[in-house]
Image (tube, grey):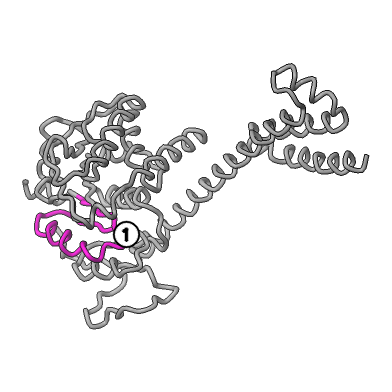
């Protein structure tokens, strides 16, 4: 009874998360809701998991839960991967904007002689990646 | 190469820790009338400083983003500067500057928007057997997924017209960009042509090149990209 109560609280948390996630990713949200509800059902009706398992040819209910858990975990990992990629795209746009802004600023700045070019060493944070174009050299 | 055309040719050179080779590569490109743009992709070995001393336009990513992101940065910059032709050129020393006029001439002669270098139509020095097999597999993969009939799908030497470059929607930061470019070419329905080029493999370029495991990651990247569309 104690285990059932604890698992119910945890699965209730999953349902709350799924509801919040549904707006951002309907597919992941819907899958999480289904997983949470199925989990709650089997926590309170454990014998039914064996019936379902036998129906689909797995045998034991605990094996069915284990297999489903693996599938859910892989889905969660995929979702995290997609989120990381989306964040990476944002970082890329930001870095590109910084790079082109630095170039534009360097092109507007007065030219410096070769002697004034900083020597190798740890770059300063503000202008570590500022580049400049020597006008009239290419072409 | 006509002088007036060269003035609007931008050669995009993505570079990540290429201080060893970039001097020779850029020296080979200078004096041809091209606008050379080096995209330093967050190098830590002084690549940016070396490129700047050679009087190039250098755009420096504050962090390493990947070759695909570097190419996108360079293409965007070239388009913003009014480029008529854009060439992508690796800085590990495996490409020959003398192949660029052939790509540009093919664009004009064939009225194409994309000219793609092919080592299998031209020459490739010391192509390792495993790499040859992987490239053949990539060719088959490209034919199945995009319908493009190509002999070399992962060659960094390419040329685009302004219209062609503007049609490319590039989102792959890392190595999957090569496959993405081909997918975008297919999607654009613009004309493309393959041009024989020579690849000079060196120990250095082979060490920096793709490995078998990279192709797995490329497939994963492309798969993840499809899911988010």
> In this orientation, which residue lies closer to the viewer: B122 or A121?
B122
Q: Is residue B36 magenta?
A: yes
The magenta region covers: B10-38
Residue B76 as seen in the image, left or right of residue B33: right
Q: Which residue is mark 1?
A: B16
- Above/below status of B75 relative to B146: below
- Above/below status of B201 relative to A51: below
Judged from the image, the secondary structure of the residue bearing numbered disc 1 is loop
> In this orientation, which residue lies closer to the viewer: A26 or A40?
A40
For the point 32% across and 41% down, the residue is B178
| Mark 1 chain | B
Q: Residue furthest left?
A: B2
Q: Is residue B228 magenta?
A: no
The reply to whether residue B188 is visible in this rendering is no
For the point 31% across and 63% down, the residue is B17
- Of the 4 image quadrants, the one containing the C terminus of chain A is bottom left
> Residue A106: image x %, image y %?
32, 68
The reply to whether residue B165 is visible in this rendering is yes
């Amino acid at each position: 009874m104690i285990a059932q109560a604890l698992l119910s609280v945890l699965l209730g948390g999953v349902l709350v998360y799924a509801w919040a996630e549904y707006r951002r990713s309907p597919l992941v949200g819907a899958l999480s809701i289904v997983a949470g509800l199925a989990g709650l059902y089997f926590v309170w009706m454990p014998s039914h998991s064996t019936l379902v398992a036998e129906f689909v040819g797995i045998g034991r209910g605990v094996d069915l839960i284990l297999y489903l858990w693996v599938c859910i975990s892989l889905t969660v990992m995929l979702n995290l991967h997609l989120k990381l990629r989306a964040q990476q795209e944002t970082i890329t746009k930001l870095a590109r904007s910084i790079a082109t802004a630095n170039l534009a600023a360097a092109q507007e700045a007065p030219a410096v002689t070769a002697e004034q070019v900083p020597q190798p060493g740890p770059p300063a944070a503000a202008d570590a990646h500022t580049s400049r174009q020597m006008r009239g050299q290419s072409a | 190469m006509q002088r007036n055309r060269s003035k609007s040719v931008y050669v995009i050179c993505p570079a990540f820790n290429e201080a060893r080779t970039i001097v020779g590569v850029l020296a080979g490109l200078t004096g041809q009338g091209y606008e050379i743009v080096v995209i330093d992709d967050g190098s830590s070995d002084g690549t940016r400083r070396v490129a700047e001393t050679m009087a190039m336009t250098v755009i420096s990513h504050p962090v390493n983003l990947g070759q695909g992101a570097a190419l996108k940065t360079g293409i965007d910059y070239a388009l913003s500067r009014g480029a008529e032709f854009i060439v992508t050129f690796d800085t590990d020393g495996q490409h020959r500057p003398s192949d660029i006029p052939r790509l540009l001439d093919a664009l004009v002669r064939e009225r194409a928007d994309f000219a793609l270098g092919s080592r299998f139509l031209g020459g490739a020095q010391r192509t390792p057997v495993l790499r040859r097999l992987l490239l053949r597999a990539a060719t088959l993969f490209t034919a199945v997924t995009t319908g493009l009939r190509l002999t070399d799908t992962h060659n960094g030497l390419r040329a685009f017209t302004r219209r062609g470059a503007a049609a490319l929607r590039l989102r792959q930061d890392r190595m999957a960009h090569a496959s993405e470019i081909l997918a975008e070419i297919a999607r654009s329905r613009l004309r493309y042509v393959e041009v024989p080029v020579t690849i000079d493999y060196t120990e250095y370029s082979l060490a920096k090149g793709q490995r078998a495991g990279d192709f797995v990651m490329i497939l994963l990247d492309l798969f993840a990209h499809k899911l988010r569309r």
